[in-house]
Image (tube, rainbow, N blue to C red):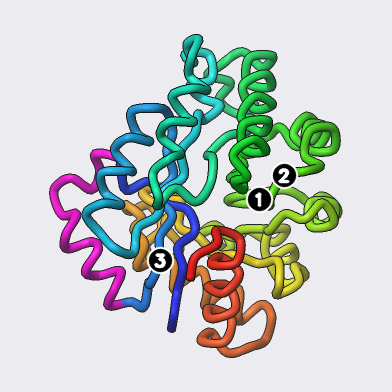
Amino acid sequence: MILFDTHAHLNFGDFDADLDEMIGRARAAGVVNIVNAGYDLASSRRARELADRYDLIYIAVGIHPHVAGKALPGYLEQLEMLAAHPKVVALGEMGLDYFRDLSPRPVQRKVFREQIALAKKLNLPVIIHDREAHGDMMEILREDGPGLPGGVIHCFSGSWEMAKECIAMGFYISIAGPVTFSNASRLKDVAARVPLDRLLVETDAPYLAPAPNRGKRNEPAYVRYTAEEVAALKKMEPEKLAKICTENGRKLFRLP
């Protein structure tokens, strides 16, 4: 298979001990591209270092909603400087998280809107995090989203009705490891319905390892299990599904 892990966090310490080996396993599994997403300014800088080291890694820089409350004045200017790196392909991850509520919700919404505005200014697509915040996230996209040069709802967890509206706005829907879980009936239904030209797969490594590695550290090589599950749901060959998702990722992130 030819695979594109469109969302990982290889800049986390979980990979420090075996980074080269992990990249080798990804290549052996057929992974040709990885988008390494920043969480804050420090992890965005670390993502840049890894992209300089490995040819298959590209970068997204952004402020996660968990740390939105720690975003200091001038953070947008720093993000803009980080985004000047030639391998930066998106801003993110950004968005809302009302599950853990680690930043005040009004601050999360403010920082989310500010990063959307920056993405428009820089002509970069966005990578959006949405957990237990579907209503407010959709309201912000309806109000602030028009004019964005593309984007993806990463690790999608909403309903098919929400997915349809996101697709109509021009977003891609990215499916992660939980689609392989036996109790993920709603996500399986969404994955089966998303049009092929709007579908991406990801790991969100080191989190959300798919079956048969559930509960373990996730890594880009495991994106194949997600692709295989989605292919089964769509009743198509895994190689074909993986190739289409890879082409979609390269189109969204403007890779050759």
Residue under label 2, please give it: 148
- The disc labelled 2 sits on which kind of residue? Leu
* x and y percentages locating residue 57 in the rendered image: 35, 58
Characterize the local packing of mark 3: few (<14), some (14-19) or many (20 or more) Cα atoms within 10 angstroms: many
Q: Main secondary structure of the magenta part?
A: helix
Q: Mark 2 vs mark 3: which is more N-terminal?
A: 3
Q: Does the magenta stretch include residue 80?
A: no
Residue at numbered disc 3: 33
User: How far across and down, in percent of the image, does residue 42 sit?
Assistant: 33, 28
Name the foreground residue: 172 vs 201.
172
Residue ID at (33%, 43%): 47
Residue 151 tag number: 1
Which of pointers 2 and 3 indicates the residue nearer the eye? 2
Tell me, yes or no, whether the two marked residues, 2 and 3, touch with CB atoms within 8 Å: no
Q: Which residue lies furthest to the bottom in this view?
A: 237
Query: Please, what secondary structure does the residue beneath circle 1 have?
Result: strand
Q: Which of marks 2 and 1 is in front?
A: 2
Left or right, 34 with respect to 127, comes to: left
Q: Nearer the viewer, residue 125 or 103?
A: 125
Residue 16 within the segment the image draws in magenta:
yes
Q: Distance between the residues labelled 2 and 1?
A: 7 Å
> Answer yes or no: do the residues labelled 2 and 1 have beta carbons within 8 Å?
yes
Whole-number angstrom distance, CA of label 3 to CA of label 1: 17 Å
Q: What stretch is highlighted in magenta?
A: 12-28
- Residue nearest the observer in this picture, 215 or 144: 144
Question: For numbered disc 3, what is the local secondary structure?
Answer: strand
Q: Position of residue 143 (x, y in %)?
A: 84, 32
Please name the residue shown 68% across and 30% down the image. 117
Vertically, is 73 above or below 56?
above
Q: Residues within 10 Å of mark 2 (few under 14, many from 20)?
A: many
